[in-house]
Structures are given as C-alpha cells and as structure tokens.
Amino acid sequence: MSKTEYQIKLHDGPARLGLLGDSETPLLVKYEKMDIAPYETIPHNVPREIAEWGVSETLEMASESDSEYAFIHGSRYTDLRVRCALELEEIGFRKLIVANMDELLQRPMEMVRILTGIREAIKPETMLCSAFSPPAFIPLLAYMGVDVFSDAAAEFYGMINVLFTETHTYPLDTYRICSYSTDELIERNRLTLDLVLREVREHIKNGTLRNLVEERAASSPQNMSALRILDHEMQEFLQKYTPLY
C-alpha cells in the first residue's frame, strides 16, 4: 500500500489543510484511479449481526491487499465503524473511505456521529475519504475532518442529466438551465466539485470555513440538520480544534 507522506499544515476547527505529495488537501481525486482494497458490500441499514460479518470479511480481504485505499464498513453502528477503521490502520492503511456515504448524507444524526467518532479515533495522519459527495455537502464534510473526495458523484449525476452548482443539484429535465451532452455534463459537474474544494482550502487558510459551512447548510434540510446536530452534540469535538482568544 502507498506510503505517501501526509502532513497537516493548518486547522480551521476540525478541518485540516494538508499536503499529500505536491497536492493540498482537502482535494478531489478521480474515482477510477483510486486503488481500493477488496471489501464486502453491506447496506447501511442492516441488523448488527450482518454488519459485524461485513466488517470481519472486509478486514480479512483488506489484510491480504497492498492497495492504497480501504473502505470503512460497519453500516449504521458507530462502534463497528470505529473498530473497522482502527483495524485497517493496524493493517497499514492511511487512506480510509467511509462506506455508504450516499445514504449517510440522508441520515444527519448517523452521519455526524459516525464521522466524528471515526475522526477522533484514528490517527491524525490517517486521511478520511468520501467516495460520493454532492458539492453542497463538501464544506460540512471537510469541517468534520474529511480530507479526500472522489469525483464519482459527478459521473453518477451527469449520467442521469443532473447539473451540479455549488449549492444545488438540478435535474435538467425539470430545470432547463442549460443543455449539455452527457460527457460535457459529467465534466461540468467535476469542475464544480473542484471549485468547491478550492473554496474550502482557501477558507481554511483564512480561518473562515465555518462561514462557508453555515452558508451551504441552507441548501437542504439534511445539511442544516447535520450542522445543528454537530453544534449541539459534538461541542467537545469542535472545541478541541478551536483556538481560545
């Protein structure tokens, strides 16, 4: 597996501005170029016994892999997610992908508890990754300590004729904002993801990421709920990285 050195340069709350090789993080990567260890696919909302089995199978498969990334499974159970993440670290992985992110985005309570639980448990130099993130959620996810985002959402939404803007996803069959071929729309969506991550990095550098997070939280009830839960339930997590003046 890759031993690429990751260095944290700056915090803005729990968000991290880092350096991975020559690239600043949080950063966008091509999903097709992510070298991911084999894993057992388990849905998010399953009985605990099935989730435990999925974690065990994923860890066994990952232990025999020299891939760069590995999926953190555990379904909706925070303790299983944390266990999976810690054991993947012991195997040697330093780029961990949160599984079922598309479903977590629709479950604000579980998303906040799982992401903050993992981020607090793993080593600072271990990178937390999201394989599927529409642009409006990226500032919040980065604020909770996610370092790497794949472009998979750009392709998925482009294939179903949905346009990304910084704050919304627009079905172009309903909102006739523009007209693109599928390939053009995928690339347009990818550029939007890249732009949002550039925004995030600059806000971290200027200590203003929280402002961007609050602005984008208004984009959906799920986004707003997640921020409120983070503020109300995870103050210790937030204050750990917040300077006192």
Image (cartoon, rainbow, N blue to C red):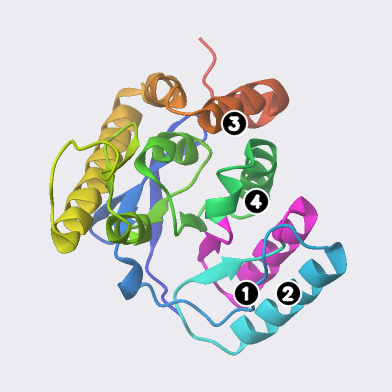
Residue at mark 1: 41
Instruction: Mark yes or no: residue 240 visible.
Output: no
Instruction: Mark yes or no: residue 175 visible.
Output: yes
Tell whether position 88 is magenta: yes
173 sits left or right of 225 in the view:
left
Mark 4 is on which residue type?
A: Ile
* First in sequence: mark 2 vs mark 1: 1
150 sits left or right of 217 in the view:
left
Residue at position x 37%, y 69% in the image: 4
Say if 33 sits above or below 242 in the image.
Answer: below
Camera-nearest residue between 196 and 236: 196
Residue at mark 3: 226
Residue count near mark 2 (Cα–Cα under 10 Å), binned few <14, some 14–19, many ≥20? many
Q: Position of residue 186 (x, y in %)?
A: 22, 57
Q: Which mark is residue 118?
A: 4
Tell whether position 127 is magenta: no
Residue at mark 2: 54
Q: Position of residue 185 (x, y in %)?
A: 19, 54
Camera-nearest residue between 186 and 70: 186
Residue count near mark 4 (Cα–Cα under 10 Å), binned few <14, some 14–19, many ≥20? many
Q: Quadrant of residue 241?
A: top right
Residue at position x 60%, y 48% in the image: 104
Q: CA distance from mark 2 to mark 3?
A: 26 Å
Q: Quadrant of residue 49?
A: bottom right
Q: Which residues are magenta?
A: 75-100
Q: Give the residue furthest to the front.
A: 174
Camera-nearest residue between 208 and 197: 197
Mark 3 is on which residue type?
A: Ala
Q: CA distance from mark 1 to mark 3?
A: 25 Å
Q: Disc 4 or disc 3, which is closer to the eye?
A: 3
Q: Position of residue 18 (x, y in %)?
A: 36, 47
